[in-house]
Amino acid sequence: MTWHLTEDVEEFHRAAGDYLARDPARRTALLTVSETVRRHGPHAFGEAEPARFGWWQERGGGAVGAAFLQTPPRPPLLAPMAEPLARELAQALPGAGVPVRGVKGGEGSAQAFAEAWTGGGGWTVALRLRLFRLGELTPKRPAPPGAARQATVDDVPLAAAWMKEFAADIGETSDADHTQNVARRVADGCLYLWETGGQPVSMAARSPLLAGQSRVSPVYTPPGLRGRGYAGAVTAAVSRSALDAGAEQVLLFTDLANPTSNALYQRLGYRPLADYVDLAFS
């Protein structure tokens, strides 16, 4: 039984693709991030180091039982896995020269990884997340003034600026240029704006359909325009676009420390599915 590590996303998908697709909701982040790397290259997220991947498999070519990926300098992202496998991964990564400053995943597996990596201390909970899955979409009625529309190439500068503000809101402090990311979403037809009085006031995006799932992220309204229902309206619109595209599961993550967004998404028909944590190492 062993972990296999690679920077070759195609090798990763040949080995672990079926494993990821068997539970596309709980493995949504690995599916969407690895697909972005497949389509746009090993530096798709603007990082200097290439993306890294891994899967756990019984010796002799048995079934894949776990997987992870990392787009440095971001921490490893763990698929749901047994705690012993998370500890094994922590032991496997240093030999591969992978910089690790934290870990993301289910609480049990993330803590098992953190304890193995740090020797039992030196880590803190940076963020608690909840994964939601859409039941019956129930947009608020009446909707706020305005209407949703797909973003176009003319919207890229504004949406990229909003994406940077969103990243700052969730604690990402890098100076990354979000233009390429936004342009990809616009080209895929997956970025929507809520517009009122001829002006965009909120945005939401989703991932392209993959293994029957599409995940909404990000949702952003500038501070001065919040509290008017725009975020809920544009989230409903982008969720509807995922359903219309054939999504069997529409997903999103929320910050558990934000009761406003958690309540909003549940009013729209999203239901809790699983909890995750981001752990930061000292």
Image (cartoon, rainbow, N blue to C red):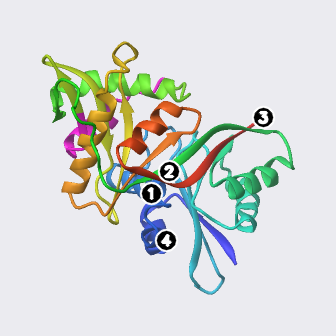
Q: Residue at x 58, y 84 (%)?
A: 61
Question: Can see residue 96?
Answer: yes
Residue 33, percent from left and from top: 43, 51
Q: Quote the CA–CA distance across marks 2 and 1.
A: 10 Å
Disc 4 from disc 2: Cα separation:
22 Å
Which quadrant of the rendered structure holds the N terminus?
bottom right
Locate residue 104 relative to residue 45 in the image: left or right. right
As helix, strand or loop, the secondary structure at mark 3 comes to loop
Q: Nearer the viewer, residue 244 or 190?
A: 244
Dot label at residue 16: 4
Distance between mark 4 and mark 3 Cα atoms: 31 Å
- Label 2: few (<14), some (14–19) or many (≥20) C-alpha neighbours in 10 Å: many
Disc 1: which residue: 28
> Neighbour class for label 3 at 10 Å: few (<14), some, many (≥20)?
few
Residue located beneath label 2 in the image: 131
Rendering quarter of residue 72: top right
Distance Cα–Cα, label 2 vs label 3:
26 Å
Label 4 or label 2, whichever lies nearer to me, is 2
Q: Position of residue 44 (x, y in %)?
A: 40, 44
Q: Which amino acid type is marked by label 1? A: Thr
Q: Which portion, as a residue range, is magenta? A: 175-192
- Residue designated by label 3: 282
Residue 207 pos. (x, y %)? 33, 49
| Alpha-carbon span between mark 4 and mark 1 | 13 Å
